[in-house]
Image (spheres, rainbow, N blue to C red):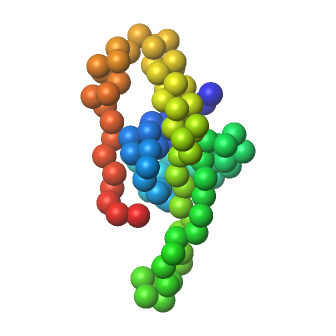
Amino acid sequence: MTTQMLAVLSVLVGDPAADWYGLELTQLAGLKPGTIYPILDRLLKLGWLERRWEEVDPSAVGRPRRRLYRLTGDGASAARWALDEHLSALGVSREERTATRRPRLGPA
């Protein structure tokens, strides 16, 4: 598992029931914009994510609709396990792991 994918998973498990959009995930994970969509596609193929279009009127919000991503139940469990395994291998304690959750930027 790549460092970039782990960064995305870390953001997603911070609020596993939330809907996230690509740019938001890119910013919170500290990635360049071109790297996020291949990661999201891989997670979709694994069944860890589901996606849907945002239900807004583009003319009312002044921007195109966003594609939203959310962890599946299995994806949330698998993501937590992957992060725990990686951090455990690095010698990071469980207490340190839970103390470093990243906040959301704002509403989706």
Q: On the rendered image, what quadrant is the C terminus found in? A: bottom left
Q: Is residue 37 found left or right of 101 in the rendered image?
A: right
Question: Which is more toward the observer, 41 or 4?
Answer: 41
Q: Position of residue 65 (x, y in %)?
A: 54, 75
Q: Is residue 103 found left or right of 38 in the rendered image?
A: left
**Residue 30 in view, yes or no:** no
Q: Please report the residue visible at 35 percent of the width from the left and 18 percent of the height from the top.
A: 94
Q: Please report the residue visible at 43 percent of the width from the left and 88 percent of the height from the top.
A: 60
Question: Which is more toward the observer, 33 or 12?
Answer: 12
Q: Is residue 90 found left or right of 3 in the rendered image?
A: left
Q: Residue furthest right?
A: 45
* 18 vs 67: above or below: above
* 81 vs 49: above or below: above
Q: On the rendered image, what quadrant is the N terminus found in? A: top right
Q: Is residue 29 found left or right of 35 in the rendered image?
A: left
Q: State the image quarter where residue 105 is shown.
A: bottom left
Q: State the image quarter where residue 14 is shown.
A: top left
Question: Which is more toward the observer, 104 or 4?
Answer: 104
Q: Please report the residue visible at 30 percent of the width from the left and 21 percent of the height from the top.
A: 96
Q: Residue furthest bottom?
A: 59
